[in-house]
Image (cartoon, rainbow, N blue to C red):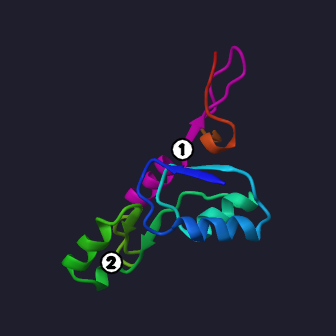
Amino acid sequence: VSFNSTVPLTRLDEKMINQILHEYKVHHCELLFREDVTVDDLIDVIEGNRRYIRCLYVYNKADACSLEEVDELARKPNSVCISCYMSLGLDYLLERMWDDMGLVRVYTKKTGSKPDFTEPVILSADRGGSSVEN
């Protein structure tokens, strides 16, 4: 077993990696770490049955928090602060959801007629892409 890393590994050491590989009956392999992974991340890769998806953390009741608390939460990665009661941040939440999910509206039309802008087709980058031709 040999392994290389392009970043320093702070959560795993060579002994721990060898124990995990031995547990899964992997005796000959080459590992390349491109990020500082945890034990769970390594096990998920070995098992091959996990798929990680991006998320967006939505904090409601921003009207009940102080301005400093809302500012702190809003500065966290992948976070949006809203208030359903006061309808604050809902438009921004909708915009972030569309952007983060990579959604695109496509309006179809039959040849020779005007496009129907009432029911678009929603395309996602995660489900095969969103390229449009002609």
* Amino acid under disc 1: Gly
**Residue 89 screen position, x and y as percent:** 35, 64
**Residue 87 screen position, x and y as percent:** 37, 70
Q: Is residue 62 left or right of residue 110?
A: left
State the residue lying farthest toward the left.
Answer: 68
* Amino acid under disc 2: Ala
- Secondary structure beneath dot 1 equals loop
Local crowd size for mark 2, using a 10 Å CA cut-off: few (<14), some (14–19), many (≥20)? many
Q: Is residue 100 left or right of residue 92?
A: right
- Secondary structure beneath dot 2 equals helix
Label placed on residue 102: 1
Along the viewing direction, whichever of 41 and 14 lies nearer the viewer: 14
| 2 or 1: tag closer to the N-terminus | 2
In this picture, which residue range is highlighted in magenta? 91-116
The image shows residue 1, relative to residue 67, as above or below, that is: above
Along the viewing direction, whichever of 88 and 44 lies nearer the viewer: 44
109 inside magenta stretch = yes
Q: Quadrant of the N terminus?
A: bottom right
State the residue lying farthest toward the right.
Answer: 25
**Residue 32 screen position, x and y as percent:** 57, 48
Local crowd size for mark 1, using a 10 Å CA cut-off: few (<14), some (14–19), many (≥20)? some
Q: Nearer the viewer, mark 2 or mark 1?
A: 1
The residue identified by callout 2 is: 62
Q: Quadrant of residue 115?
A: top right
Q: Is residue 82 visible?
A: yes
